[in-house]
Amino acid sequence: MCLTVPARVLSVDGESVRVEVRGVERQAKCFVSVSEGDFVEVGMGVVLGRISRERFDELASFSV
């Protein structure tokens, strides 16, 4: 099983993206189409896919 976290895309540079996870900026690899401002799920430093704002809010409400 893999732990994923919700994040917001801050910038995109080819296959590398800068995301914000709980107020902390992180670098991640991305092989799916995303744009600045999109909400995504990140696992093991890789963007797994886009998620809706509602799903982001739901996942972000859980404490880790």
Image (cartoon, rainbow, N blue to C red):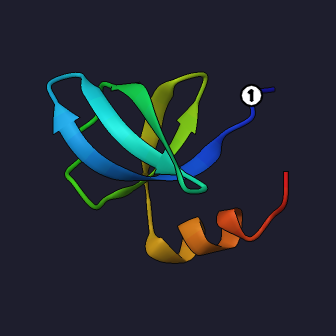
| Residue in front for this viewpoint, 31 or 24 | 24
Height in image: 26 above or below 16?
A: below
Point 52% across, 23% down: residue: 45
Can you identify the residue that label 1 sits on?
A: 2
Relative image position of residue 34 (x, y in whole percent)? 24, 46
Relative image position of residue 50 (x, y in whole percent)? 40, 51
Mark count: 1
Point 81% across, 26% down: residue: 1
> Mark 1 is on which residue type?
Cys
Give the residue at the far left of this rendering. Answer: 14
Relative image position of residue 64 (x, y in whole percent)? 85, 50
Give the residue at the far bottom of this rendering. Answer: 54
Give the residue at the far front of this rendering. Answer: 24
The residue tagged with tag 1: helix, strand or loop?
A: loop
Point 57% across, 69% down: residue: 55
> What is the crowding at mark 1: few (fewer than 14 residues within 10 Å), some, or many (at least 20)?
few
Relative image position of residue 8 (x, y in whole percent)? 41, 55
Point 46% across, 73% down: residue: 53
Q: Is residue 15 left or right of residue 48?
A: left
Height in image: 58 above or below 10?
A: below
The quarter holding residue 2 reads top right
Q: Is residue 48 left or right of residue 2?
A: left
| Residue in front for this viewpoint, 24 or 29 | 24
The quarter holding residue 58 reads bottom right
